[in-house]
Structures are given as structure tokens and as C-alpha cells.
Image: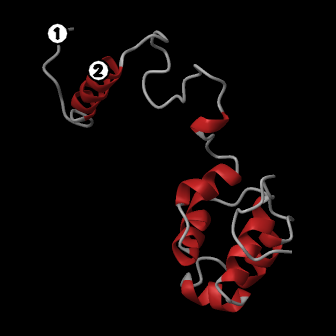
Amino acid sequence: MSTEPESNPTPRPLGEYLASLRLSKRMSLREVEEASEKAVSNAYLSQLEKGRIGKPSPNILHALATIYGVPYESLMEKAGYIVSKASLPKGARHGRVATFANDDLTPAEEEELRRYLGYLRSFKGKPRNEKS
């Protein structure tokens, strides 16, 4: 098994990928546990690397991404939490902005929707002057 991260054209399972990252950093399971300040136990990481745990929580993935120096999003993709834009069919929406809206939104319209959503969210928990 190669210790180089993601040079293989066929995607590797999450556990195998995490094991290759750990080995490339020359870290033991216990060293990862210590580096994560015990957020990721060595026993849990062992189970994860062996494929016995397929979908660790996002906070575990975040801790491992930080320790291994890889993008958090790449671990989230491998775990199946998010889908990369590259894997979507041409013309498909990623779902980041207004998935309920027309498929023909321009980038300017999407930006305007983001700003409006930010405006609406600024009122969260604050009373608004609304007429009943």
C-alpha cells in the first residue's frame, strides 16, 4: 500500500485514505490521539482505518484534517457528507444557494440572494415590526 495521499486515480475508501495520511506523517495511532487532545481515540481511529466505521462525525474529520494537513472538505467528501462539484452532472446545481429557485439564475442574482439571506438572518432572535 502506498503512503502517498490521493495519487491513485480510483478513489480509496475513507479508512484506507486516513491510514495512508497517518503513515505519510509517520505517526502512530497514539500520536494522533495525543495530537487531537484525545478528541480521536487511538482505538476509534484504528476502527476507522480498518473500515469498521464508515462515517465518522464531522468534528472527528475536522480534527484529523488539521493533524494531517489536508482540506477538511476533502475528508467530508470521502465520508459522504458533501458532494464535489466535479462529480455532479453538467448543469446540475450544487445546492449552495437557493436550490428552490430557477436553474437559470445568473451569478449576480445568486449573489443578491446571498445578501438578502444574510439580511434575513440578521434578524434571527430579534423582534421585527411586522403587521399581523
Please give left or right for residue 58 compared with residue 14 in the image.
left
Q: Which residue is farthest left?
A: 129
At mark 2, the secondary structure is helix
Residue 108: which numbered mark, if any?
Answer: 2
In the picture shown, does residue 55 fall above or below 29? above
125 and 69: which one is in front?
69
- Is residue 63 rendered to the left or right of residue 44? left
116 w.r.t. 19: above or below: above
> Residue at 68% of width from left, 74% of height from top?
21
Task: Determine crowd level at label 1: few under 14, some 14-19, many 20+ residues with C-alpha closer than 10 A.
Answer: few
Q: Position of residue 127 (x, y in %)?
A: 18, 29
Q: Nearer the viewer, mark 2 or mark 1?
A: 2
How many residues crowd around disc 2 within 10 Å: few (fewer than 14), some, or many (20 or more)? few
From mark 2 to mark 1, how far is it between C-alphas?
A: 31 Å
Whether residue 93 sits left or right of residue 20 in the image: it is: left
Quadrant (top left, top right, bottom left, bottom right) of the N terminus: bottom right
x and y percentages locating residue 130 in the rendered image: 17, 15
Tell me the colour scheme of the image: secondary structure
Q: Which residue is mark 1?
A: 131
Q: Please say if the residues under marks 2 and 1 sit with CB atoms less than 8 Å apart.
A: no
Kind of residue at badge 1? Lys
Quarter of the image for the C terminus: give it. Answer: top left
* Dot label at residue 53: none
Q: Residue at x 28, y 33 (%)?
A: 121
